[in-house]
Amino acid sequence: MSVVMPAATEPTATAGKVARRGYWKRLPLKAKVGAAILAFFILVAIIGPSIAPFNPSYQNPSLNASLEGPNAVHLLGTTQSGQDVFSQLLSGIRLTMVLALIVGAAASFLSVVVGVTAAFLGGLWDEVLSLFTNVVLVLPSLPLLVVFLGYLPQSGQTPTIVVLSALSWPWGARVIRAQTLAIRNRDFVAASRETGERSWRVVMFDIVPNEISLIAANFVNTVLYAIGASVALAFIGVADLNSWSLGTMLYWAQSQDALHLGAWWWFVPPGLAVALMGTGLGLLNFGIDELGNPRLRDASTARRFGLRWRPGEPTPVATGPRAGRRLPDRAPAAMRSAAPMPPAVEEGAR
Amino acid sequence: MRYIARRLFFYAVAAFVALTVNFFIPRAIPGNAVEAIMSKYPNLQPGAEKALEAMLGVGHPGSIWHQYWQYLGDVVHFNFGTDLIQFPAKVSTILAAALPWTIVLVGVSTVIAFFLGTALGILAGWRNGGWSDNSLAPLMFLQSLPYFFLALVLIDVFAIKLGWLPAGQGFDGSVTTPGWSLSFISNAAQHAILPALTIVVTNVAGWMLTMRNVMITTVSEDYVLAAQAKGLANRRVVITYAARNAILPQLSGFANALGFVVSGAIVMEIVFAYPGIGQWLINAVSSNDYPLMQAIFLVITFAVLLANLLVDLVYIAVDPRARTRSTR
């Protein structure tokens, strides 16, 4: 439990950055909703286990305490062995969250290292690292995870964290490599090199800071993935089943036949929690995307921001009241001239 | 041709990596793996030790490279050794029985989800604003549902509460026997509705969201405006000008998505007690049936690689640039 605090404060730090004045205001509603959902779950992860009414593993010996529906004592009912579902949920959210955040941080780090190295060194290094990245990306991860974890002893969360981190970096590495390729030849990097800066300084102070938003988006994505994967793995039973995570809750519910006993309160809360966490992260990511690519903004956001004149853009064309109906109206010049996004060119384009 | 050759080379490397990983993982366990496993499971059948030794190459003469070479030969001949739990049974027999269930289920529902999601994404991207924006959050929610959780809910509602559809299994053994008979196929199809629905519902959102985003970007390109200015019918502009270009990233995202779908589907199979390969994988893991576990990993990986290769060929057919690049 000692690892809990530093990891759990991490997203709060990001949230704090987002909350910088102006930036927050410009954030699309979607992203705000997503951030709010996440903040709620982070709060639960931090204080949850301390306000839990019961020990999640405590089995109430009395017979009428088993498989109770939601009531005043057990807010979300009890399991077949008389354990309090609400307390399990609170502990489960913490463990799942912490696990996903650690995996997110570790995998993001790997993504940056591989992506930047490939693009910065170029040549053969790039060929080899890109090939490796694409290979790991195309292999179906869950069977691979299962095979790895099947051989490891299931005690503690370390095997899950290590194997998940080791398999979830390639997507980010690809994105970051592409971005580094674009930045590498910019003037400020060239200037930095001309003045005799060492390579690692160029990378650390010129390239990586310019990719922070990309890295953040990638972090959010990886956390999302880690939640799904860790829950699925625990559901199969390849996890430490003595600990309470959302996945192990679902594992016990399934293996003790909650479905056929009609105990919906046993499996619906953890499943909903996973889905809500995913929704929050997804919305946040979508919002971040929109900040970077104004054309993705929906009609209402676009109306608020699309017409604001910014230096370097042609005079905006006012949209009529029927904006959003027909094409030329819907895509005012100001929006069309926004940084064109090149079509995603895949393998072999080089 | 050069493009195809490049892709073939890539998949060959990926397959090689999968094979090698599969070979070395069990050998990386410290100590005597056979004894460790045998002592962990004293109730394993007597022949199991032999099967394990054969798989791990214990007592085999020759270096590890020799074993590796032999292993590659075995894989080429679909010889995955003997199963530990169903002892005398060959792993390849079990695979042959389970594979069609998963391929048909996952294949059909992935294709449905892809086309449905892409079509919805085209619509949502074309008519950006209004309903399509309001549906973003619910879609995000659907997409975040773990497959197996949605499966639980669907069973609870449609099979247990309403009793419309069967709650699990691939077919009803008391009504029909497997074969090419009409009664079996309709029975199996009935059992496949809920599993397929699970895959489609959780996947449609993903395809739709990515298609919408690319579509929005594409729709504001000049050539789409030009097509409209020429007075072409809206339908033609949407499909041949905007959607055809917007669909390319969708296709290249297939590699990533497919692995994800397959992963979700194999977990979902336990909930439905579906007789496919996922069910066997999970059984193999929980009973430490290593030969079966590894064979399933290989089969799933190869299926995914093959599907990706097919998508690449479609990509060439749809994107003229891929063709011209190769004639360069």
Image (spheres, rainbow, N blue to C red):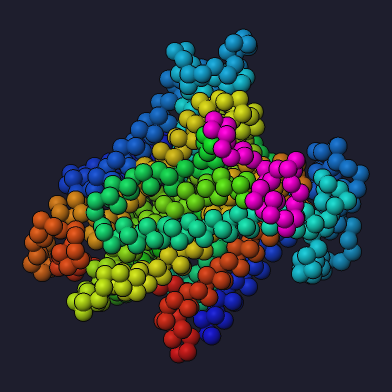
| Residue nearest the observer in this picture, B72 or B107 | B107
Q: Is residue A329 magenta?
A: no
Q: Is residue A282 something one can see in this rendering?
A: yes
Q: In the drawing, does residue B110 fall left or right of residue A338?
A: right
Q: Please identify the residue farthest to the bottom as the structure is shown.
A: B328
Q: Is residue B32 something one can see in this rendering?
A: no
The residue that appears at 46% across and 68% down in the rendered structure is B252
Q: Please identify the residue farthest to the right as the structure is shown.
A: B46
Numbered disc total: 0
Residue A303, compared with residue B126, is above or below; it is: above
The residue range painted magenta reads B159-187
| Residue nearest the observer in this picture, A350 or A82 | A82
The residue that appears at 52% across and 66% down in the rendered structure is A134
Q: In the drawing, does residue A215 fall left or right of residue A80?
A: left
On the rendered image, what quadrant is the N terminus of chain B found in?
Answer: bottom right
Residue B215, compared with residue B321, is above or below; it is: above
| Residue nearest the observer in this picture, A105 or A309 | A309
Q: In the drawing, does residue A68 fall left or right of residue B103?
A: left
Q: Please identify the residue farthest to the front as the structure is shown.
A: B182
Q: Is residue B170 magenta?
A: yes
Dominant secondary-structure state across the stretch colored magenta:
loop
Q: Position of residue A32 (x, y in %)?
A: 27, 42
On the rendered image, what quadrant is the C terminus of chain B found in?
Answer: bottom left
Q: Where is residue B14 in the image (x, y as percent from the top left)?
A: 61, 68
Q: In the drawing, does residue B180 fall left or right of residue A189?
A: right
Residue A327, compared with residue B204, is above or below; it is: below
The residue that appears at 59% across and 76% down in the rendered structure is B8
Q: Where is residue B62 in the image (x, y as percent from the top left)?
A: 87, 66
The residue that appears at 48% across and 18% down in the rendered structure is A70
Q: Where is residue A272 in the image (x, y as percent from the top left)?
A: 45, 35
